[in-house]
Image: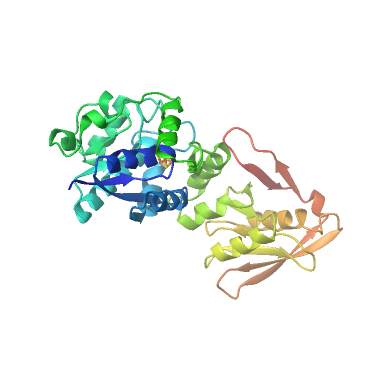
Amino acid sequence: MAKAVVLMSGGLDSILAAKLLQEQGIEVEAITFVTPFFTSKNAEKAAAMLGIPLHIVDITDEHLKMLKAPKHGYGRFMNPCIDCHALMIRRAGEIMKEVGADFIVTGEVLGERPKSQNRQALNVVEIESGMGGYVLRPLSAKLLDPTIPEKKGLVDREKLLDIRGRSRKPQMELAKKYGITEYPSPAGGCILTDPMFSIRLRNLYKVEEEPSAKDVDLIKIGRVFLSGEGALIVVSRNEQENKELISLAEEGDMIFEVDGYPGPLTIIPQNDFGEGTIFEAAALTVRYSKAKSALEADVLGWVHGTDKKITIHVDNPSEAVDIIPAKDDELTRVVRK
Ligand code: SF4
């Protein structure tokens, strides 16, 4: 019996791709990838619904490295879709060999995403991944050149489809036919397509040459500022974010809280920061606390994982720093007056 590994995002297209193969009696296993930008949640649900095994593969390190300078550039925001697909297909190829599968399947539809799902982009992905001829896209297969599994007769090309374009109608009809009623919306899933997060990420790469997963997780929470010296400052917004921020802190990060007043936690992730940044972080901590209208406040600061503690006195907190609104590709800036 032929066996395929399906790249499973958990969206309708990847579910249908798996279904079309199952219908031909082909054994299917699913693969999904995790990074700080997307999770395996939807794929887990989909694999359970399809009753197939799921391989969850963490590609954070490779993805962060690629994301810094993707060979084929970014989409509209910080989404490097062509390089991202090539990376996923390459890793899927490794798993294909490990599990003894014959080919790789994706739910891609020709023309559904103009930049990353056109004929040329699909070819580039195959070449870059080193898996040329082994990637079957069942939803659009009849519009594409026959793949190796089709030529070998492992898959019946006649039973594959010729869906093209951005309309989701054919997929919805197919979902109806298969009785699939629950699936996530096509847009969700990857925060690299989020405009606000993309600005944060671009600025993170400016201050941190090789950001870690923790750095990315930090800029997903709270308010994010750029100090006068150009360092990142993250201020939590609620109790839940306080907990998240502390759980992400690593040795060397500097953390702040207002002495004697409820309020946020603020963090300067470990990088080169000077006294200006420390004061601005302290002033922001007061500004978003119950002490914001007080005449003065003390802020406790400590270097996470060490005994190093300081107290920063902030006079007239509401006037201590200028907050310059974000514009274009920049973050909100905070500058000591
Ligand atoms: S949307 Fe995100 S996960 Fe999907 S290919 Fe693009 S970068 Fe990768």
Image height check: is 88 above or below 313? above
Left or right: residue 39 versus residue 88 is right
The residue depicted at 56 percent of the width and 65 percent of the height is 247
The image quarter containing residue 243 is bottom right
Residue 290 image point, x, y percent: 81, 58
Residue 208 image point, x, y percent: 48, 51
Q: Nearer the viewer, residue 170 or 44?
A: 170
Ligand 1 rendered quadrant: top left
Q: Work out whether residue 199 can be spotted.
A: yes
Left or right: residue 32 versus residue 259 is left
Q: Nearer the viewer, residue 320 or 2?
A: 2
The residue depicted at 72 percent of the width and 57 percent of the height is 285
Residue 62 image point, x, y percent: 35, 50
Image height check: is 277 above or below 192? below
Q: Work out whether residue 80 can be spotted.
A: no
Q: Nearer the viewer, residue 281 or 36?
A: 36
